Amino acid sequence: MQAQKECRLFLQKLLQNPPMLPFDPKLLPLLFAVTQEGSNASLKSVVTLIEQSPRLTTRVLAVANSAAYGLEFKVSTLQRAISIMGLREVRLLVLMVGMSSFIREAQLPKEFDTNKFWKHLLSVATIARALANVFGGAAGACGPDATAEDRLVMVPDEAYIAGLLHDVGKLFLAASRPDIWEKIVELEQAKGMETFEAENTGWGMDHALIGAAVLHHWKLPLVLTEPINLHHAPDLATSFKMEARLLAVANCLARYSHDTPATLGEYVLENLPQGCDPEAVSAAVFQSMANAQVAGFAELNA
């Protein structure tokens, strides 16, 4: 009972004083709104909010002028940069800047391995996007035998973002309660537990719930927050079930060696949609990791 009370109090305080972002938090829901089909949100409103953050403005212009776009002229205005990059690319960049800023400025325990953490996030994001491409398609899943629960609402870009944010709760916990984080790490090592198991056993609340609660507070869409909340317990999902299973599979596959296409384990196979070809999934994941340009994001963590 005391542990439950402590968890509730922690979450209440965290949401009352959420982690600081290097830009107006209203930018996040606006970016998701403006990238939806049929949206009436204006590009000008996006530009106005980005301009309030000199750092974010600099990053958007720098990326637009990078070799990745091969431009023969220099882009000097935000509106032009956004029109070149596309709003979805800008949305991802904003999230990357927010994440890297928090990691850089948070008072994390010395033992918290930020490089390992980043690598895992990027791997899960890359795999989640590949899975969304495989799980999607004309049939809504991998084949004609798909059931209603196998219908994927999340598009590949959203799957990447979900992967990028799925473990953000670990950061919030480590920064806010390093004592609890250290206790959980000790329990993991002593009992050979997964992190979420140690969190639930040693404290009573896992990082998935913490991260989803903050992201929901920032008004990110439910298609992201619900799967993030249940990526360690996809069977409990009542909405966005396939999205929760996709994120769970991506999280599991990120731990595999990707030197060669892997033989999928039992947990992964259980969470694939009906009709999915495991070999096609394995090959898609292997190819996505081979093509991943993780180094392109390294400067954000420098």
Image (tube, rainbow, N blue to C red):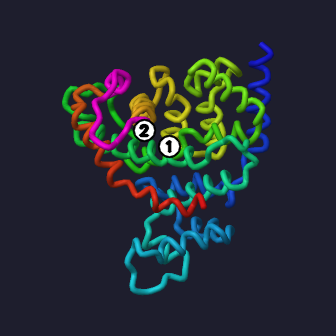
Q: Nearer the viewer, residue 146 or 287?
A: 287
The residue tagged 2 is 254
Residue 147: where, in percent of width, then height? 28, 25
The residue at the point 28 percent across, 41 percent down is 260
Q: Main secondary structure of the magenta part?
A: loop
Residue 262: where, in percent of width, then height? 29, 35
The residue at the point 43 percent across, 86 percent down is 73
Which element carries disc 1, helix, strand or loop? helix
Q: Specify the segment rendered in magenta.
A: 254-272
Residue 120: which disc? 1
The residue at the point 44 percent across, 56 percent down is 294
Mark 2 is surrounded, within 10 Å at the Cα level, by few (under 14), some (14 to 19) or many (20 or more) other residues, namely many
Q: Quadrant of the C terminus?
A: bottom right
Residue 269: which disc? none
User: Label 2 amino acid?
Assistant: Ala
Q: Given contact means CB atoms under 8 Å apart, are the residues at marks 1 and 2 in contact?
A: yes
Q: Quadrant of residue 244?
A: top left
Q: Is residue 136 magenta?
A: no
Which element carries disc 2, helix, strand or loop? loop
The residue at the point 24 percent across, 34 percent down is 142
| Left or right for 297, reference 266 | right
As drawn, 19 above or below 147: below
